[in-house]
Image (cartoon, coloured by chain):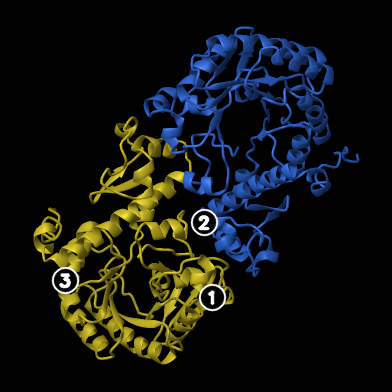
Chain colours: A yellow, B blue
Amino acid sequence: MPVGTLANVKTVTPDQLKATGAQMVLSNTYHLHLQPGEDLVQAAGGLHKFMGWNGPMLTDSGGFQVFSLSEMRSISDEGVTFRSPRDGNVINLTPERSIQIQNAIGADVIMAFDECAPSGCGREITEKALVRTTEWLKRCISAHGRSDQALFGIVQGGEFLDLRSESARQLVALDLPGYAIGGVSVGEAPEVIDQVVQHTAPLLPADKIRYLMGVGTHREMARAIAAGIDVFDCVIPTRLARHGNAIVNGDRWNLKNARFREDFTPLDPTCDCYTCQNFSRAYIGHLLRSQELLAYTLLSIHNITALVRFTQEIRRSILAGTFATEFADWIKPVEAEPI
Amino acid sequence: MPVGTLANVKTVTPDQLKATGAQMVLSNTYHLHLQPGEDLVQAAGGLHKFMGWNGPMLTDSGGFQVFSLSEMRSISDEGVTFRSPRDGNVINLTPERSIQIQNAIGADVIMAFDECAPSGCGREITEKALVRTTEWLKRCISAHGRSDQALFGIVQGGEFLDLRSESARQLVALDLPGYAIGGVSVGEAPEVIDQVVQHTAPLLPADKIRYLMGVGTHREMARAIAAGIDVFDCVIPTRLARHGNAIVNGDRWNLKNARFREDFTPLDPTCDCYTCQNFSRAYIGHLLRSQELLAYTLLSIHNITALVRFTQEIRRSILAGTFATEFADWIKPVEAEPI
């Protein structure tokens, strides 16, 4: 899922997005609550109609962003109170309120309001957050008022594999249509993320959707898919684009680099995206040097296509029974970086 | 002609541009000379291939921009010497050099290097610029090395109608494939521009292309077409877009205005552009308030379509013999603003 935080995938129209092959888009409840507000999105006929995307959509719960406002919030069993960074107003976000907002926004999948314990906070705090996450999930289920929206739960437990097992066990007992692995993308080392994913994904039912939140490099996706993950979201393709970078064969190239100045080949000659079919590395470098916003559109189109195409090729190889051999380089175990 | 200064129409892909109905694109020689340089554009296979636009293109001569660098240039009969605002290097731009650069860039129509006398500089300076413009035009014709590019001359003469007549007479004698009216868009009062256009357009041969440079409001275009003008260029549609404005029925609306906040109708319900077919005023206002760049793309698509559609409707009415009645409101004489 490309990320469309504020009801748009940055610099890309829905038509361009559809052409990348992306099927589902994530939008952020926290951001939409602040601007333009869920009432406006609802009055527009819901998020799909508001932003002109007629494919599946998912909203997160807002929890991740609220817990990132470390100095502006207070947490209790009831929920989280914080000051809006926009106008300073006090906002209460509870499991019930998050679901109510997501019901109004109207995505196809909505996420439970969970407590994301910060990386490295220790076992005790992580365990408390796990317990609270399950309690809050039960309140989310009670508050959920729309049968046309699927509610997913989020497995917590930090880097502690036994806590991940316990969280997964509690969530699976609630028989939800999908489960996410949360709390793995916040400054965590790649080998820790990998360990958590390899341990947790197989604990979730294979006939339900399994979603790894906030992850999207080639290697992370390949290994997570091997462990059973079905869905990802990641800002990487569009964020890299806005920094002038293209994703080519899983590498990142800065198109402002002088070596591309007179390079008239496409970003990736094997790619069938609009950008690669019509423009050269030299042209995109020129647009970036000229600070032309079109560069971000062209790079976003390519980067999203590159990630989607990677998962499409994995799907094909799985169906053909060749995943383990074809993608052997990508699913090699992740080793800790030498210190 | 939408303006694609640096080998792109800002925030719009060639596919999106084609869908607006725009047929021809203008690009700026001065800017392309500084970045990426004409040699690179030529090495890419020419401007069309470089920027992915396979329709007609025109480049200006660079003169207009160079003459605007008032404190950084010196003018002689030979040409203009100026310091690059990019790196401070001294650059000589002569009629021969301008044509050489435009030959390398490779547009379908190239413009003669003319002297644009500043507005209000008086009759003597304007007359000298007129004489020099004709001399420079002759040197441009001699220097022009590509039979697949049409070279247009530019009528000068400021606000002095007899000088406009003299300039037109001198240019028409050189039998060029097209003629432009220059020096009318630089801070000149609308009624003066109008007077010059109404006087000059009929002096140019009706079987050649007649091009009014830098003009593009509904009223200016309607009156200029009535006087015989065929082609315009203008940054208005894309520049207004980047300031959050939509062109609707010739008016300009600021979409950040609170009155559009809950307005779920398209910018113009009669418009068939991608933006109006898929998005509401409320959505575009939301994107602008969120500083989302997609707003500029959507507004540019609509604004270019609005201007192109206006000229398409004029063409239809001319063929139907109803131009004068159907567009009576637009071709009313321009009156000086009350002081």
**Left or right position of B131 against A84:** right
Q: Nearer the viewer, residue A66 or A41?
A: A41
Occupied quadrant, residue A131: bottom left
The residue type indicated by label 1 comes to Glu
Query: Label 2 marks which chain's residue?
Result: B
Bin the neighbour count of mark 3 within 10 Å (Cα to Cα): few under 14, some 14-19, many 20 and up. some
The x and y percentages for residue A141 are 38, 89
**Left or right position of B226 against A277:** right
Dot 1 or dot 3, earlier in sequence: 1
Q: Nearer the viewer, residue B146 or B88?
A: B146
Bin the neighbour count of mark 2 within 10 Å (Cα to Cα): few under 14, some 14-19, many 20 and up. some
| Residue at 47% from the left image edge and 38% from the top image edge | B53
Q: Is residue B146 above or below residue A134?
A: above
Occupied quadrant, residue B186: top right
Residues at marks 2 and 3, CA–CA distance in whole angstroms: 36 Å
Which residue is disc 1 drawn over? Answer: A38
Residues at marks 1 and 3, CA–CA distance in whole angstroms: 36 Å
Occupied quadrant, residue B72: top right
Q: Is residue A92 above or below residue B47?
A: below
Which residue is disc 2 drawn over? Answer: B292
| Residue at 10% from the left image edge and 63% from the top image edge | A324
**Left or right position of B256 against A311:** right
Asked which secondary structure carries label 2, the reply is loop
Res A227 label: 3
The x and y percentages for residue A174 are 28, 90
- Check if mark 1's residue and mark 3's residue have beta carbons within 8 Å: no
Q: Which corner quadrant holds the N terminus of chain A?
A: bottom left
Q: Nearer the viewer, residue A142 or A21?
A: A21
Query: Label 3 marks which chain's residue?
Result: A
Asked which secondary structure carries label 1, the reply is helix
The residue type indicated by label 3 comes to Ala
Q: Is residue B170 above or below residue B324?
A: above
